[in-house]
Image (cartoon, helix red, strand yellow):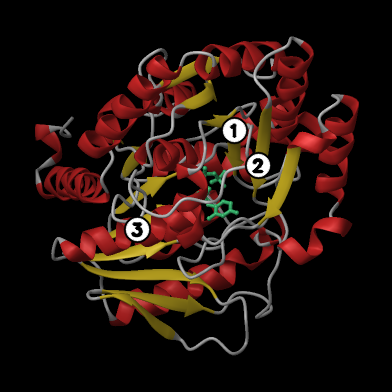
Amino acid sequence: MRVAMVSEHASPLAVLGGVDAGGQNVHVAALSKALAARGADVVVHTRRDAADLPQRVALAQGAVVDHVPAGPAATLPKDDLWPHMQEFAEGLHARWKQDRPDVVHAHFWMSGWAAVAAASRLGIPVTHTFHALGVVKRRHQGELDTSPADRAQVERDLVRGADRIVATCTDEVFELLRLGAERSRVSVVPCGVDLGLFSPRGPQLERTPGLRRVVSVGRLVARKGVGHAIEALGLLRAGGGPDTELLVAGGPRAEDLATDPEVARLRAVAADAGVADRVRFLGQVARDDLPALFRSADLAVCVPWYEPFGIVPLEAMACGVPVVASAVGGLVDTVVDGGTGLHVPPRSPAAVADAYRAVLDDETWRRGLARAAVSRVRTRYSWDRVAAMTLQAYADLLDSRSRPLSQGVSS
Ligand code: UDP
């Protein structure tokens, strides 16, 4: 099967951990490779964001990244890309006219718009994954949401205009239904995790003698809730809990930590909470170094205000680390409360502190959670399984299009 992935801002080749480079980059790269490993022929179209990039770069056997010109060949914030999507769509159309894919799979709303604009003129079916929904972002971020004003309407149009929608979790399905999606056109396929890289056995970052360790990994943006993880550490200390440090990965490169405004804000939170000496900012950590960081931890904390999916908890669980997670979005499906970690309400440092204490005070239970975490991730979240489910969604789509309308669509 010939698959055209469209991922306008999130190149599978990007460095992770910066403001706009996170789960979507990982998702598109890993899914493309896993589909190729199952015999699909995959081209990932992404915006050219540097002048010196070759037009095509091999990603794996059977998968290539294709750089499509759209706006300046320079890094731009993703919220500034919308005006360049017409040019991006024209580029896609020109490519697909020459070299027609069987199915297009678009990621994020701007890619979806461009993919539908290009593919509909050629009669190519489009599958769409939102990754994040503007209505949810607006609900949680209010005035802080810098998305273009058109986003909400484009997403409503896409919910009806895409031939099939692949949601990444059950919570997203409810949001899509509220936006007018037809349930029979929505498949649920989770994100996966690289089980070759993230595993319990292997090198470990050195421990600090006498301290328990909690880790947080992710982009340093307010909604990721790292501030709450820090406040909770303060409450743990004030309550006489085990002496614990918090290592925070993500944000700027290590050499730029001193001048980063979000790091400065979080350092102030740590000082106010009385744990400035127990919080360490690592800056961006290369993907290959993350397993050693996770393995060195007793617990991972992931307490965003909201989370469309959240790959980090899967990575932690795959390394044998239980997760304290807010019960939002994809984390409701991935983390089993009392089974592979603990759920807490979002924006609740006191609940996070209680969860830290419950797990850190009971090593036998902690180890049980860790074992269950590894087995859950191995059975449900391999990229190979995710690729098989995705191919099934493509097959359902092609099947529904090949049948006369009177036979209806498949579920
Ligand atoms: N990540 C990384 N280095 C960092 C911070 C994050 O490699 O310093 C990776 C992390 O391991 C995960 C991805 O970036 O694979 C973040 O994905 P997630 O779905 O958790 O959040 P998003 O960034 O998409 O909101």
- Closer to the camera, 339 or 407? 339
Q: Residue, x 48% and y 70% (percent of image)?
A: 13
- The image's mark for residue 214 is 1
Image height of 146 relative to 375, above or below? below
What is the spatial separation of the Cα atoms under label 1 and label 2, in whole angstroms? 6 Å
Q: Label 3, on which residue? A: 30
Q: Are marks 1 and 2 in contact (CB under 8 Å)?
A: yes
- The image's mark for residue 247 is 2
Q: Amino acid at mark 2?
A: Leu
| Residue 254 image-quadrant placement | bottom right
Image height of 36 relative to 207, above or below? below
Q: Amino acid at mark 3?
A: Ala
Q: Amino acid at mark 1?
A: Val
Q: Earlier in the sequence, mark 2 or mark 3?
A: 3
Q: Earlier in the sequence, mark 1 or mark 2?
A: 1
What is the spatial separation of the Cα atoms under label 2 and label 3, in whole angstroms? 26 Å
* Mark 3 secondary-structure assignment: helix
| Residue 396 image-quadrant placement | top left
Q: Residue, x 15% and y 32% (percent of image)?
A: 408
